[in-house]
Amino acid sequence: MIVVTGATGNVGRPLTRALAEAGERVTAVSRHAAVMPDGVTHVAADLAEPSTLVPALDGAKALFLLLSGDLHAPAARPADIIDLAAAHGVRRVVLLSSQGVATRPLGRTRIAMRGVEDALRRSGLDWAVLRPGGFASNALAWAESVRTQGTAAAPFGDVGVPVVDPTDIAEVAAACLRGDRHTGEIYELTGPEVITPREQTAAIAAALGSPVRFHELTREEAKAGMTQFVPPELADDTLDIIAAPNPAELRISPDVERVLGRAPHSFESWVARNIAAFDAGSGNHEGHGQP
């Protein structure tokens, strides 16, 4: 049985579906009750209180570990989850980490995530680490303003990075959870091209067939919005990257194709699959959760 944490989010939801469709027994974990695919067991747990995860770990062979924003806070102890998993017989952990661990190793939240990676390596478990860059699904933050005002707002409008489709992350995670050949691997996951927020807005407008105006936020405005969902340290680390990505953060990684045998999805293909979220006339405005 495979346990998926963050199962209602942008990575966890397609990962849960992919594992279930592959015939795996899956226990999906999220903080609140949620509708799951047929055959998937759901357990409500809060990873900030690792003991609440114990019922999900009974009989588990593998764990997908996704750390929510509050687990990046200075007082959090996410490595305790790895110890708990090992104590309950889990043999493999796939950790969703961050590209910034390698590209910005001195950022406060990156130091903390490096500590989680190190704890996993020392655990004696089979492991794989996924280090994605920016998520295509971050554009869902614009969904309401696109629907109601025809606008999208972001800082650093003409600075791009190769954002990755969460479905690609999920498919790589599924491969790592199901097979031994990825044990001990660290995969950097990006999209196929660098794309700016202004270009993302244009892609959404093209898919809608109607104009969407881009509004550039100041860094301060962007941080104020981000800190409603994540700690200030994580917001600052993220803004540092998207303000001035370094060469490593602009690199198109081959790892999605190495694992899946196909190129990563483009931002445009992500938009095409999620256009209902931006379309005022679709009536399908379900939230997709955090990464």
Image (cartoon, grey):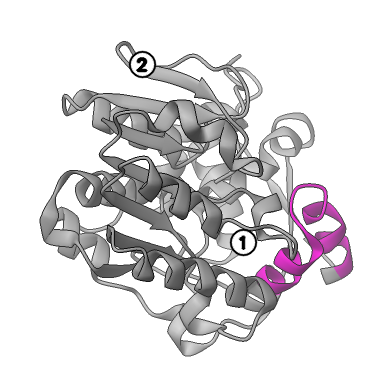
Which disc number belongs to residue 37?
Answer: 2
Q: Is residue 230 left or right of residue 258?
A: right
Query: Residue at the location (44% across, 48% down)?
Result: 65
Q: In this view, does 155 lie to the left or right of 2?
A: right
Main secondary-structure element of the magenta-colored stretch: helix
**Could you classify mark 1 by the number of other residues whose Cα lies within 10 Å: few (under 14), some (14-19), or many (20 or more)?**
many
| Amino acid found under the numbered disc labelled 1 | Pro
Q: In this view, does 233 lie to the left or right of 256?
A: right
- In the image, is residue 158 above or below residue 4? below
What segment carries the magenta color?
Answer: 220-239
- Depth check: 216 or 83 in front? 83
Residue 210 picture location, percent across and down: 61, 37
Q: Nearer the viewer, mark 1 or mark 2?
A: 2
Looking at the rendering, in which quadrant would you find the N terminus?
top left
**Could you classify mark 2 by the number of other residues whose Cα lies within 10 Å: few (under 14), some (14-19), or many (20 or more)?**
some
Residue 220 picture location, percent across and down: 88, 67
Which disc number belongs to residue 45?
Answer: none
- In the image, is residue 85 above or below residue 209? below
Residue 90 picture location, percent across and down: 31, 44
From where the camera sits, is residue 18 visible? Answer: yes
Q: Is mark 1 on a helix, strand or loop?
A: helix
Which disc number belongs to residue 197?
Answer: 1
Q: Is residue 71 left or right of residue 6?
A: right
Residue 216 picture location, percent across and down: 78, 63
Query: Residue at the location (66% across, 23% down)?
Result: 280
Sequence-first tag of 1 and 2: 2
In magenta stretch: residue 226: yes
| Amino acid found under the numbered disc labelled 2 | Pro
